[in-house]
Image: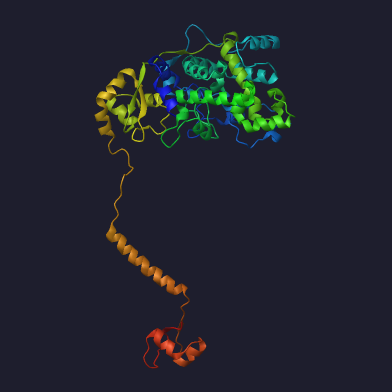
Amino acid sequence: MKYYIDCYMAMSRAAATLLAVLLWASAVQAQVETGAVDDEEEEEAVVSDFTGDDGPDAAQGDDELVFPEAMGDYLDSLMTLYMTRAYLVAESDCQTAAEDPVFTREQYMDRLYRMPTVIEMPWNEVVQACIDRYTKKSRRQVSYLLAACNFYMPFFEQALEAYQVPLELKYLPVIESALNPQATSRVGAGGLWQFMPATARTYGMEINSLVDERRDIVKSSWAAARYLRDLYRLFNDWTLAIAAYNCGPENINKAIHRAGGERDYWKISPYLPRETRGYVPAFIAANYVMSYYCDHNICPMQAQLPVKTDTVLVTRNVTFSQVAAVMGLSTELLRSLNPQYRRDVVPGATAPSPLRLPVADATRFIDLQDSIFAATEGTFSKRMEVEIDHGTYAKASKKSKRSRARRGRSASGSKSVTVRRGDTLSTIARRNGTTVAKLRRMNGIHGNKIQAGKKLRVR
């Protein structure tokens, strides 16, 4: 964990400048809590993390292509995001054409072959279907993704280079989250790289009610690079490593076994979950469209650089609303710069926590932190200590003891009867298998006089 934090704090201010724009979350607003996936898209999109319901056996004989969730059209939700409104504008000198030019199969094959990649990028009908999805139906989305790539890629490339994995893997978040750090799939995978919680914790990311480091661009990228390296070491094949990133190494091993020991992704594909059969082709298509968008008459959006940013360490709990109020900032801006904080709270009291701000405001925060902390006092309702009223507690305890004693007597088998007209102690004793002496003792009777209608304990 310390390693990732050190990497995070060591980022240059130039890289921090890029972070401000990349956090505008280019496409998928697929969060579970916001319900951003439209109904008409759900029948075409699919969760990019395999849940185990559609196993390798079910995959056989089912040739329907299922696109990753992030390949849906999420342009409407994208336009509502703060960083999109603040920093993206249409390219004035280039207009994305409505129609996609027609190319031959040989042209697609040649372009894929000529891409400078370590990972094999072959052509087939499934890859073509994924390319067509981007270049025909999702042309406007690609325009926004291209603008986002200009800001995300330095962070992705730095992490991938550090672990010596192929740089073309930087396009995995395109099909995982459509470059939205806030994206959450329907099975709970989160962040740009769509980590499931268990895997995220394995690779050093913290997840709790206030913080989700899967949404942290730097930490999640370094964790993803390390995870991909580990998967490659397991299979010694990058295509299988990519497939395992989607469905887990266990399902890859099962598919290899069912395919008679074959280790070619395209030969074991029929034995993989449906999601994974479309996942590797989608990855190839993402690499293609990010390289050849000009040939398809797609223009990137223009991304205007935001103000430079810097990080301050907060040692007390503060809320975005209080920071914004004291410093005259937008709460939306603070959210976009700090997507890892799930409830607009920086939990500095738990551990020193970074807060990213425009560079000029980072200095102002230090000058105003006393006022900010004072404004936050009373905001948090959690109590450190609660007193007990011992007098009330003692009375309640005595009542409880008496109640338990009564219940104990009742449970021990006590029995009462009603005295009938003409009854005597001796007749009541005979009917209930006891003696006159016991009746007198249990009921406090002196002599033989009893009254009809009264109750007598008989045991």
Instruction: Name the spot of residue 321 as percent of width and height, x first.
Output: 33, 30
Residue appearing at x 34%, y 66% in the figure: 399
Residue drawn at x 51%, y 32% as measured from the top left: 202
Check the image and report above or below for 158 versus 40: above
Q: Nearer the viewer, residue 64 or 230?
A: 230
Q: Residue 53: x, y in percent? A: 63, 37
What is the x, y in percent for residue 308?
36, 16
Is residue 102 toward the left or the right of residue 457 in the image?
right
As drawn, 417 above or below 173? below
The colour mode here is: rainbow
Say above or below: 454 vs 45.
below
- Return the residue found at the far top: 93
Comparing 296 with 155, the one in front is 155
Q: Which quadrant holds residue 24? A: top left
Q: Is residue 423 visible?
A: no
Image quarter in which the N terminus is found: top left
Q: Is residue 296 above or below residue 328?
A: above
Q: Is residue 125 visible?
A: yes
